Image (cartoon, rainbow, N blue to C red):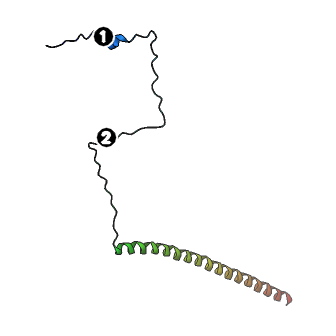
């Protein structure tokens, strides 16, 4: 025997609670915050984590090491050459200045000799 229920009938628990005369005011929607959540759903509970750590052969290790040493030695050689260039430029500038001063002194000497005679 099937039991039919009346959709308009109220349940006993609903009729047992007295209806409140004042309705609760609607709540404001939650304000956005600086937080956010990110939900990831997997098709299964198992996860596979792959880690790759390359193994260097002795030849590769020496190659990397030699390359880095070569870079630093190259920078050192470059700095030595640049300093040498500056020093040589200073020496040549001093020589040129001394030649100009000597030439000026010789000119003055010749001029004084001409004045005497």
Foreground mark, 2 or 1? Answer: 1
Residue at the location (46% across, 11% down)?
22
Give the farthest residue toward the right.
116
| 69 over 15 or under it: above or below | below
The residue tagged with tag 2: helix, strand or loop?
A: loop
| 77 over 39 or under it: above or below | below
Circles 2 and 1: CB distance less than 8 Å? no
* Residue 24 horizontal/vertical position (percent): 45, 16
The residue tagged with tag 1: helix, strand or loop?
A: loop
Q: Judge by depth and name the residue closer to the eye, 45 or 81.
A: 45
Q: Judge by depth and name the residue closer to the eye, 54 or 6.
A: 6
Q: Quadrant of the N terminus?
A: top left
Residue at the location (76% across, 86% down)?
106
N-terminal of the pair, mark 2 or mark 1, is 1
* Residue on which disc 2 sits: 41
Q: Judge by depth and name the residue closer to the eye, 101 or 5.
A: 5
Q: Judge by depth and name the residue closer to the eye, 61 or 51.
A: 51
> Residue 37, located in which quarter of the rendered image?
top left
> Residue 112, located in which quarter of the rendered image?
bottom right
84 sits to left or right of 27: right
* Residue on which disc 1 sits: 10
* Residue 66 horizontal/vertical position (percent): 42, 75
Q: Quadrant of the C terminus?
A: bottom right
């Amino acid at each position: 025997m099937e039991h039919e229920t009346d959709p308009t009938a109220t349940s006993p628990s609903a009729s047992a609670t007295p209806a409140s005369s004042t309705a609760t005011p609607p709540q404001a929607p939650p304000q956005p915050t600086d937080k956010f959540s990110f939900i990831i759903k997997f098709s299964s509970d198992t996860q596979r984590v792959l880690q790759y750590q390359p193994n260097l052969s002795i030849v590769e290790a020496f190659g990397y090491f030699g390359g880095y040493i070569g870079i630093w030695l190259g920078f050192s050689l470059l700095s030595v050459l640049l300093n040498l260039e500056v020093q040589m430029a200073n020496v040549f500038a001093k020589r040129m200045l001394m030649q100009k001063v000597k030439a000026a002194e010789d000119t003055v000497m010749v001029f004084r000799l001409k004045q005497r005679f």
